[in-house]
Image (cartoon, rainbow, N blue to C red):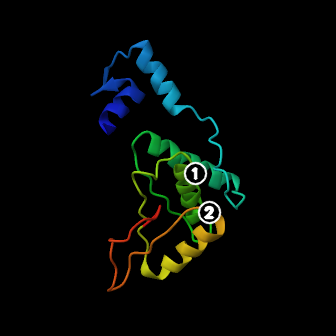
Amino acid sequence: AAQMLQVALSGEYDSAPVWLSPEVKQLIKELTAQREIPLPQHLRATLRPYQHRGYEWMYRNMQLGFGSIIADDMGLGKTLQVITLLLKLKQEGALVQKKAMVVAPTGLLTNWQQEISRFAPSLSVMVYHGGNRSLDTFDADIL
């Protein structure tokens, strides 16, 4: 899929030009459009411009079926960007059948819980950690 997307975006394959129908060109134009994605309702935070762009980037990637990796200096709001995306997914009904999983170092589990509670209290969380962990009672938006 990634190679097909690269061919469609570049218009060539192995240095040979590739013809794209007007419909495919229009689809690519729509997929790559940089229109603003509204923040989810009930988000209890104000995102900085770069955080909003990061949230929009992750959302677009998700819509295209791609994952995202975000990494930068500590304290710049990566957790908030992910929480914003998760809240948007819940708002759109995407967390009804499928749930989200956050994988974090043990030392950050409490931080994630607190940040979710603070910025998106409508998201439910279950921490899966420790010797007595069980998924038998898993009924949360986020694991």
- Residue 14 position in % (x across, y down): 27, 28
Vertical comparison of 12 with 84: above or below: above
Disc 1 to disc 2, how far (Cα)? 15 Å
Question: Is the residue under label 2 in contact with that under label 1 (CB below 8 Å)?
Answer: no
Q: Residue at x 54, y 74 (%)?
A: 113
Which of label 1 and label 2 is nearer to you? 2
- Residue 91 position in % (x across, y down): 57, 49
**Residue ID for mark 2:** 120
**Which part of the image, by quadrant, shows the C terminus?**
bottom left
Asked if residue 114 shows in the view, the reply is yes
Q: Nearer the viewer, residue 3 or 39?
A: 39
- Residue 38 position in % (x across, y down): 65, 43
User: Image quarter for residue 77?
Assistant: bottom right
Q: Residue at x 54, y 46 (%)?
A: 57
Q: Nearer the viewer, residue 45 or 139?
A: 139
At mark 2, the secondary structure is: loop
Mark 1 residue type: Tyr
Q: Give the numbered dot on residue 2.
A: none
